[in-house]
Image (cartoon, rainbow, N blue to C red):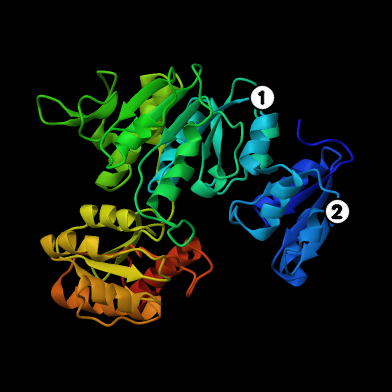
Amino acid sequence: MPLKNGSLILVVGFGLKTGVSIARFALTRGVRVRAVDSKPAEKLADSMRATGNAVELVSGGMPLSALDGVSLVVLSPGVPRNGELLTEADRRGIPVIGDIELAFRYARCRMAGITGTDGKSTTTAMVGSILETASLGRVAGNIGIPVLDVVDGMAPGSILALELSSFMLESIERFKPEVAAILNLAEDHLDRYPDMESYLAAKLRIFSNLDAGCTAVWPTDNPWSGRFAGAIPAGVRRVSFALDDAAADVHLGTTGEGVEILMIAGEPCLPAGDLPVMGRHNLRNAVSAAAIAFALGISRQAIADGLRAFRGLPHRFENAGTAAGVRFINDSKATTISAVATALDSAGAGSCILIGGRDKGLEFSPLREAILRKNLVVFPFGEAREKVRAQLGCERAGDPSLEVVVREAWEYARRNRAAEIILAPGCTSYDEFPNFEIRGEFFKDLVKRLRLEVGDGET
């Protein structure tokens, strides 16, 4: 095992979630922990308290001296793998892994790994609903639950479904999930990766260690599907999925009466109308989740029961309520262009779309066709508002403040009888909010305030 009693490890990135979970996991095994973080010490006080002040902290930078005496580096996913400190660790021959790799080395349970650009949190949560409904396991990882907080409590034979970001996959070595799934690929994180090939390579690492005892799950209907299939090692079982491809192992079919139904290996599983969540993109998420559960050997009945029980995740095309007859939809998690395109696909004609925040280096122009076809009205906001306006041909200049733009859109919707306003930013939140969750909560709270202003009791 990589953690040896009395040895010293270095945790790079000492945030309250992953960094603290790594430190706690190591400390319980008698390992000494040093943590390094570029933030000043006062910003890391909560992390220190969460570990009982048992960690040696190096703050305010990442000096190479932090590596002295260290036998292992464990990297938080938000820290780029190519930094000077980690280059020096490689030069010194010190292993560098992430929390996913560390958990895998100690796990007694079965594991499923789930990655992709869009929909991976919802798909992972759907798999989690299937597992929990059948009392088979739970979820962890990028979904907001550090894997090292739960892996010791997983019974042998239980299943841990892991949402995996490309950043997490950069720091695996031997990680070999029983089931590995890539959901899709679209432009994202081009502020971290030099090009799409580099981003794809990080995602494909999920397949790199699979063998004949594993199953690879992949879509047949993504522009990168051929690359996904080509990266699956020989001898690995394959399960394919797609929304409308009847040749895929798991897909959405239609009965003779025109009812859409989830099909698994040629057999019906669940009518699409039984899913409680909104939007056609959630049908695709359900197909993806069903494919992963099927690959794990879970019965069709358990899959259907778990999907029926799923009520959706916050900030993913979430009904935020109505005010003066206008429905508000919170899709704050839609921080990629493909995620915005998915929201537009589920939007009603003439809807108001709020796009903006901090630019990630993505192009908004691919959204123009859907906007014009559905006569959607775009309201730009945040730091990226000028880029959004220029690339989408918006008449409105926008505003740095989300609240100002929400109110402008609401006034427009009431005057023009637009049925809904959708927050689908296509950008990060970091210009105005610490994360997409806080942005989404602000949006929902604002809708409540708007209802109060007009004396509207609807929810």
In percent of width and height, residue 155 lies at 65, 24
Q: Which mark is residue 90?
A: none
Q: Assign the N terminus to one quadrant of the image.
A: top right
- What is the crowding at mark 1: few (fewer than 14 residues within 10 Å), some, or many (at least 20)? some
Q: Is residue 360 left or right of residue 355?
A: right
Q: Do we see residue 314 in this rendering?
A: yes
**96 relative to 240, above or below:** below
- Residue in the foreground of this view, choosing between 273 and 350: 350
Q: Which mark is residue 108?
A: 1
Task: Look at label 2 and name its amino acid.
Answer: Ala
Identify the image quadrant of residue 5: top right
- Residue in the foreground of this view, choosing between 2 and 143: 2
- What is the crowding at mark 2: few (fewer than 14 residues within 10 Å), some, or many (at least 20)? some
Q: Assign the C terminus to one quadrant of the image.
A: bottom left
In percent of width and height, residue 103 lies at 66, 35
Q: Residue at x 72, y 67 (%)?
A: 61
In percent of width and height, residue 206 lies at 49, 35
Compare marks 1 and 2 and give the one earlier in the sequence.
2
**449 relative to 75, above or below:** below
Q: Is residue 283 left or right of residue 82?
A: left
- Residue in the foreground of this view, choosing between 310 and 394: 394
Q: Secondary structure at mark 2?
A: loop
Q: Residue at x 74, y 43 (%)?
A: 93
Q: Secondary structure at mark 1?
A: loop
Q: Can you identify the residue that label 2 sits on?
A: 54
Identify the image quadrant of residue 58: bottom right
Task: Look at label 1 and name its amino acid.
Answer: Arg
**20 relative to 139, above or below:** below
Q: Residue at x 85, y 53 (%)?
A: 54
Q: Which residue sits furthest right? A: 6
Q: Do we see residue 49 in this rendering?
A: no
